[in-house]
């Protein structure tokens, strides 16, 4: 579905419209099953996925507990992913326009900015990882640089500038990187796996390592927030997936591609992270959960340098595809006339610096229990409201023209839907209440689930 021809002039002159936010015409919707499967391979085969898996091993799980937790989390998050993807494929609209239906044409800025800020944090994390990879490579070639306090920060800024350069070249560069990044990252993972398993004496000693939990209660105390973290890992893209499915040839193409790509790619690459980290315990006596630090222990400078260059390319691909497309559109939505996709991307880059990613990656607990679980309490409520509004309240029918106009079907109260804002606030409060009320800590451990359930229920009840 596209904009009505008779109203096109009025819509294009609206303050809510620009070309980056406009519905994609039917003739430009050319992404098939392979594109979506490869998109997920490209976004899943990355350092944060590896660190997700290795963090579970460092936290005490054995290999099958870690892989099973990640597989379950991704099967769960695939459900809201496919539900939110439907509107993008049907109407050709991006996330910040789709969310106007439930929150109002101006109220949509609230969930869009919350989603964008999380993406900025991810942008910073990936950029920090890439910068550390550059530094590790230079330290291998020039060992005297290992003790430098300034060099890691210089490398971080250099990789940040490289990301900005890709952003300025636009969406087609992202599509190109998507095709070459994943094979590089998969090759690095297999190289690390081969090297570490060889050092550890084969798969036997690695996969026989037992869980460090003393019983079921001890295991569940770690498993529950970890599962929430697994869901939170892709809770960002579960919201903005219309940014990609707006290019789909059909609903079947995007659903099949995503169902094939996401669980399989995440589980495969997670197993590599699990096995390599388990091997590091056998070899070094401690879990080395950071693959950049692990590559720095290679004794062959040439092999390590090639691996780190490949890691840089793959990290650049994932960062721009997963962490720039959405916030660029979200920031553009704040002022479509003045903020283009490229300007939104630069804003993303600057905010990513300001969120101090080095602190988010200080250890596996900060990464999983702090970052992933914490922001899932913000995004779960948004997903609940969007899905409830689109499928329960509207029966998957939208007036596309009105999404770009003031005074239309989605004007509500001065452009804001108070029911959605109230439901969002209720979900966030419940999800994060456990941070300040110790007996309710379980609500925070289930942050995404608690927020999703509360916000969707409140919104449906208020909209009756």
Image (cartoon, rainbow, N blue to C red):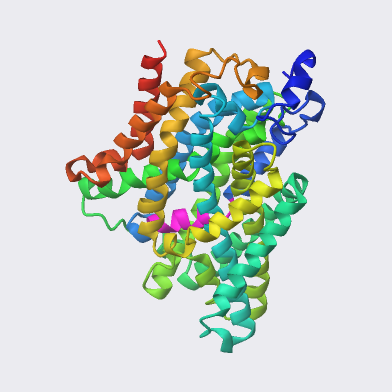
In this view, the residue in front, 370 or 16, is 16
Q: Is 239 left, or right, of 21 in this rendering?
A: left
Residue 441 visible in the displayed image:
yes
Residue 209 visible in the displayed image:
no
Residue 37, given in percent of the width and then of the height, sits at 65, 39
Q: Main secondary structure of the magenta part?
A: helix
Looking at this view, name the residue that lies furthest to the right.
27
- For the C terminus, which image quadrant? top left
Residue 117, given in percent of the width and then of the height, sits at 51, 47
Q: From the viewer's perspective, is residue 111 above or below residue 386? A: below
Q: Is 26 left, or right, of 375 in this rendering?
A: right
- Taking the magenta stretch, the answer to whether it contains residue 51 is yes
Looking at this view, name the residue that lies furthest to the left.
439
Stretch of the chain drawn in magenta: 45-56
Looking at this view, name the residue that lies furthest to the top.
464
Q: From the viewer's perspective, is residue 441 above or below residue 359? A: above
């Amino acid at each position: 579905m596209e904009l009505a021809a008779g109203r096109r002039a009025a819509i294009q002159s609206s303050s809510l419209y620009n070309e980056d936010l406009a519905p994609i015409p039917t003739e430009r919707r050319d992404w098939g099953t392979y594109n979506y499967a490869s998109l997920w391979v490209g976004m899943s085969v990355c350092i944060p996925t590896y660190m997700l898996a290795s963090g579970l091993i460092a936290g005490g799980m054995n290999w099958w507990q870690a892989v099973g937790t990640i597989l379950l989390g991704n099967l769960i998050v695939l459900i809201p992913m496919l539900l939110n993807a439907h509107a993008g494929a049907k109407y050709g609209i991006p996330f910040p326009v789709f969310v106007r239906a439930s929150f109002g044409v101006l109220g949509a800025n609230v969930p869009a900015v919350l989603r964008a800020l999380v993406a900025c944090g991810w942008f910073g994390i990936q950029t920090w990882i890439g910068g550390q990879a550059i530094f590790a490579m230079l330290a291998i070639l020039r060992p005297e640089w290992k003790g430098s306090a300034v060099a890691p920060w210089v490398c971080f800024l250099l990789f940040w500038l490289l990301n900005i350069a890709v952003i300025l070249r636009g969406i087609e560069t992202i599509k190109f990187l998507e095709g070459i990044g994943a094979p590089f990252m998969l090759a690095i993972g297999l190289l690390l796996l081969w090297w570490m398993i060889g050092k550890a004496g084969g798969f036997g000693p690695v996969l026989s390592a037992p869980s460090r939990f003393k019983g079921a209660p001890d295991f569940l105390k770690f498993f529950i927030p970890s599962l929430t973290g697994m869901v939170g890992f892709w809770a960002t893209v579960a919201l903005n997936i219309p940014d990609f499915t707006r290019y789909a040839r059909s609903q079947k193409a995007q659903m099949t591609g995503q169902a094939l790509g996401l669980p399989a790619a995440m589980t495969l690459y997670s197993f590599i992270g699990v096995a390599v980290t388990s091997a590091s315990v056998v070899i070094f006596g401690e879990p080395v959960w950071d693959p950049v630090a692990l590559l720095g222990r290679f004794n062959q400078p040439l092999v390590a340098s090639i691996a780190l260059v490949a890691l840089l390319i793959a990290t650049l691909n994932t960062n721009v595809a997963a962490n720039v497309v959405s916030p660029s559109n979200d920031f553009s939505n704040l002022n479509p006339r003045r903020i283009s996709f490229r300007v939104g991307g630069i804003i993303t880059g600057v905010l990513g610096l300001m969120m101090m990613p080095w602190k988010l990656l200080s250890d596996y607990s900060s990464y999983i229990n702090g970052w992933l679980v914490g922001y899932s309490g913000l995004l779960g409520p948004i997903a609940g409201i969007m899905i409830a509004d689109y499928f329960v309240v509207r029966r998957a029918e939208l007036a596309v023209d009105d999404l770009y106009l003031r005074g239309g079907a989605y004007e509500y109260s001065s452009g804001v839907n108070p029911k959605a804002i109230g439901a969002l606030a209720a979900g966030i409060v419940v999800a994060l209440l456990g941070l300040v009320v110790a007996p309710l800590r379980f609500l925070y451990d289930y942050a995404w689930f608690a927020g999703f359930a509360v916000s969707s229920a409140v919104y449906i009840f208020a909209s009756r």
